[in-house]
Image (spheres, grey):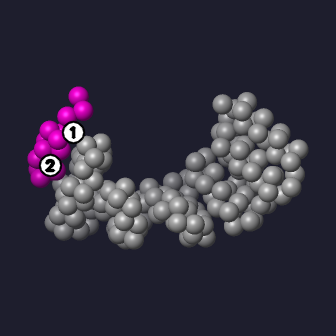
Amino acid sequence: MQRYGKAIEVLQDLIIIDPENEIALHEINHCFIMSEQPENGVDFFVSFVDEHPFSSTGWFNLGELYMRLEMNDKAIESFDFATAINEDYAHSYFNKAIIFANQGDYLSALNAFKECAEYEGVNPLTLCYIGECYEKLDDYNLALSYYDQVIEIDDRWSDAWMGKAVVYELMGEDKQALKMIKKAIESL
């Protein structure tokens, strides 16, 4: 019904009763975002982690809200707390990697994406981002190998075909790049 304010009230009551309810914590985060109240969400989660400092879900959601507010240092710190509590919290590594990539720190992004893959397992999206990091670091062979891994998993993953097209274009292999663009279009 998109009554996010009311949902926040109900979820806050639920979280008081059951502070370990991860679904409720993610849902209240979603409601703060959808109601365009990320600052209120930050206030809520700062209070929450003050009371429940070992809640990896609390720290993760706080990081997401900081990320939305472009408070990247605080977001990274929150994601680090989440993984310090629960080292296999793959989404924390993924979000850190996105922040690093957006800042142009592709080596840090690459390391965070690899940590994410270590805990999450094989995932085309993460592998594609790893390929893009190698592309940005001018390691075209490794970039191509990661894009190929994505295609082995899902040959309809158009971003992998486009990634290969970009790499081939950067390598001056325009005919090969054009073939990859056609594959990307076919995979849509």
Amino acid carrying label 1: it is Tyr
- Whether residue 7 is in magenta: the answer is yes
Our reading of the magenta stretch's main secondary structure is helix
Q: Is residue 137 above or below residue 2?
A: below
Amino acid carrying label 2: it is Gln
Depth check: 124 or 171 in front?
A: 171
In which quadrant of the rendered view does residue 69 lie? bottom left
Depth check: 14 or 88 in front?
A: 14
Q: Residue 61 in the image: state x and y as whole percent.
A: 31, 56
Q: CA distance from mark 1 to mark 2?
A: 12 Å
Specify start and end residues of the magenta stretch as a single range: 1-18
The quadrant of the image that shows the N terminus is: top left
- Whether residue 14 is in magenta: the answer is yes
Sequence order check, earlier mark of 1 and 2: 1
Instruction: Quickly name the residue at label 2.
Output: 12
Q: Residue 59 in the image: state x and y as whole percent.
A: 31, 62
Looking at the rendered structure, the secondary structure element under dot 1 is: helix
How many numbered marks are there?
2
Looking at the rendered structure, the secondary structure element under dot 2 is: helix
Residue drawn at point x = 61 percent, y = 54 percent: 129
**Label 2 neighbour load within 10 Å: few <14, some 14-19, many 20+:** some
Residue 13 placement, left or right of 101: left
Q: Is residue 181 above or below residue 99?
A: above
The quadrant of the image that shows the C terminus is: top right
Residue 48 placement, left or right of 119: left
Residue drawn at point x = 20 percent, y = 61 percent: 43
Instruction: Quickly name the residue at label 1.
Output: 4
Q: Residue 128 in the image: state x and y as whole percent.
A: 63, 51
